[in-house]
């Protein structure tokens, strides 16, 4: 009985040693870069997603602080931010004219242009990194970027048609999709409604919006020239969106009824 048990123990030891030798040989002959990819299971295009996400987050922050514009042309300087007018009239005692009747679409286009301008170098660096890792990279020189504002989300689709070829394997990525959590959709809905009230009646009641949107704080700051700065704050995420209006402005020194 003792001999049988000893034989079983020896066999077990040999099996363990054999497994260890295989692992050591595997580690010796497999490249470090391949090991990282195998164990992390990271997609080769994750860096492209990270690039898009980084600049999308930057762009959204700019849009939030500047009334939905990356480079405002008609703005009111408020606490260092160029807050764009979305409804404006230069004259006194006159209703404002909508500057952005399609605010949601305008913001989508603004973010699209921002991404097209700023992600080129970043994605070019990712391409170079993939090629240095042994990939043959085939991709369009000027890929199309689509931006869509959705509830609680900014959806970005990078139409890349990327092919990554390495050894005998090929990976194809027609579209790369990135989602960024944001309240831009909700902000545009409320801002558009406020601007319409300003264009029609010259003012809006912020309490009404907070009643129907309890998660949203709506503030109105009236300036001496008749400009109103609206600040929308999501109570849960603390994300803010600011925009300006100027409607039925009253000359300084005259008190309105």
Image (spheres, rainbow, N blue to C red):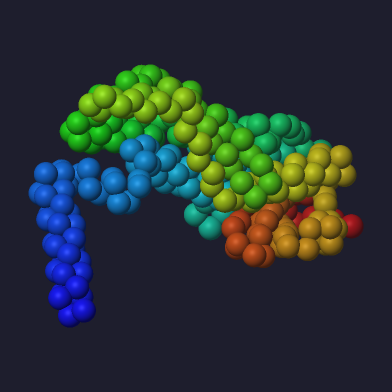
Seen from the viewer's position, the closer of residues 38 and 84 is 38
Q: Hey, which quadrant is residue 87 in on the image?
A: top right
Of all residues, the one furthest to the bottom in this rendering is: 2
- The residue at the point 35 percent across, 47 percent down is 41
Instruction: Say left or right for 78 vs 105.
Output: left
Q: How many marks?
A: 0
Residue 134 in the image: above or below residue 139: below
Residue 9 can be seen in this image: no
Residue 127 can be seen in this image: yes
- The residue at the point 61 percent across, 56 percent down is 240
The quarter of the image holding the C terminus is bottom right
Instruction: Say left or right for 155 vs 212.
Output: left
Q: Hey, which quadrant is residue 135 in on the image?
A: top left
Residue 16 in the image: x percent, y percent?
Answer: 18, 63
Instruction: Say left or right for 191 vs 7.
Output: right
- The residue at the point 51 percent across, 49 percent down is 61
Residue 176 in the image: above or below residue 47: above
- The residue at the point 25 percent across, 49 percent down is 36
Seen from the viewer's position, the closer of residues 25 and 77 is 25
Seen from the viewer's position, the closer of residues 239 and 218 is 239
Residue 5 in the image: above or below residue 161: below
Residue 180 in the image: x percent, y percent?
Answer: 54, 47
């Amino acid at each position: 009985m003792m001999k049988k048990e000893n034989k079983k123990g020896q066999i077990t030891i040999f099996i363990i040693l054999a497994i260890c030798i295989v692992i050591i040989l595997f580690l010796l002959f497999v490249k470090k870069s391949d090991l990282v990819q195998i164990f992390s299971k990271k997609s080769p295009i994750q860096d492209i997603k990270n690039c898009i996400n980084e600049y999308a987050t930057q762009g959204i922050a700019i849009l939030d602080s500047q009334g939905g514009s990356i480079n405002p042309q008609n703005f009111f300087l408020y606490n260092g931010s160029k807050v764009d007018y979305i409804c404006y009239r230069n004259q006194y005692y006159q209703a404002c004219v909508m500057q952005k009747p399609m605010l949601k679409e305008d913001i989508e286009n603004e973010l699209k242009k921002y991404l097209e301008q700023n992600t080129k170098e970043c994605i070019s660096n990712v391409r170079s990194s993939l090629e240095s890792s042994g990939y043959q990279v085939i991709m369009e020189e000027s890929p199309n970027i689509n931006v869509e504002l959705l509830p609680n989300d900014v959806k970005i689709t990078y139409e890349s048609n990327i092919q990554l070829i390495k050894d005998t394997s090929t990976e194809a990525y027609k579209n790369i999709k990135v989602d960024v959590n944001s309240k831009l959709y909700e902000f545009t809905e409320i801002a558009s409604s406020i601007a319409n009230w300003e264009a029609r009646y010259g003012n809006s009641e912020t309490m009404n919006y907070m009643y129907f949107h309890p998660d949203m704080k709506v503030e109105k700051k009236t300036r001496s020239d008749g400009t109103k700065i609206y600040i929308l704050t999501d109570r849960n995420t603390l994300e803010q969106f600011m925009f300006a209006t100027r409607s039925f402005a009253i000359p300084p020194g005259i008190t309105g009824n």
